[in-house]
Amino acid sequence: MNKLVMLLLAATLAAPACSKKPKPDESGLASAANADENIGDSDRGNAMGLQSINFGYDAYVLDGKAKEILKANSQILKDKTSIKIQVEGHCDQRGGIQYNVALGEKRANSVKKFLIELGVPADRVSVISFGKEKLLDQGTTEEAYARNRRANFVVTAR
């Protein structure tokens, strides 16, 4: 009986040490995609005015509409110099995992490059690709696919 009490006591004391921590990404830092750490997210409309942009099928080149949105986003970032963001590249659910992760990364990097060209300091913009893992719309229509092909903005610091 004494051993059982000791075992229960040890388990009780050890439990708080097993608290859930954010899963680190490949860089070793906790992912800004973790909702508990985000200050704001453009997909949800609470990223200090920053707006998500969309891409054409199998594309990562910025079209005119995307560039206009990014110009407005860059102005917000230039006005609020302490903001840091993470650009998340996303794809629709078609295609393989590796292909979509690579395409999402190209999308995020094309956004970052354009923001830098517009005068946003590179050290305030990080990128990540989620490929087809974080869909906005689970549907299988062209409209649903189009909503999922995007780059969104996560505010990581104010």
Image: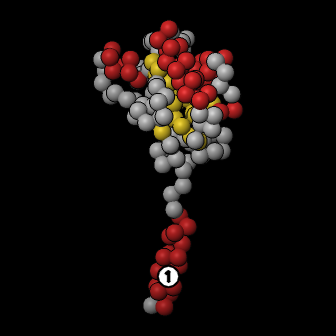
**17 vs 107, nearest the viewer:** 107
Identify the residue at horizontal 58%, vertical 23% (top origin). Answer: 74
> Which quadrant would residue 138 be assigned to in this image?
top left
On the image, the x and y values in percent for residue 36 come to 48, 49
* Relative vertical location of residue 108 with respect to residue 32 in this rendering, above or below: above
Q: Residue furthest top?
A: 64
**17 vs 69, nearest the viewer:** 69
**150 vs 47, nearest the viewer:** 47
Instruction: Mark yes or no: residue 128 visible.
Output: no
* Relative vertical location of residue 136 with respect to residue 111 in this rendering, above or below: below
**106 vs 95, nearest the viewer:** 106
Identify the residue at horizontal 47%, vertical 11% (top origin). Answer: 65
Identify the residue at horizontal 55%, vertical 48% (top origin). Answer: 23
Give the residue type that dot 1 points to: Leu
Q: Residue furthest front?
A: 79
What colour scheme does the image use? secondary structure
> Which quadrant would residue 126 be assigned to in this image?
top right
Secondary structure beneath label 1? helix
Label tally:
1
141 horizontally vs 38: left or right: left
On the image, the x and y values in percent for residue 56 come to 45, 12
Identify the residue at horizontal 50%, vertical 75% (top origin). Answer: 11
On the image, the x and y values in percent for residue 2 come to 49, 91
Instruction: Mark yes or no: residue 146 visible.
Output: yes
Q: Residues within 10 Å of mark 1 (few under 14, many from 20)?
A: few
In the rendered view of the protein, which quadrant contains the C terminus?
top right
In the rendered view of the protein, which quadrant contains the N terminus?
bottom left
Residue at the disc numbered 1: 9
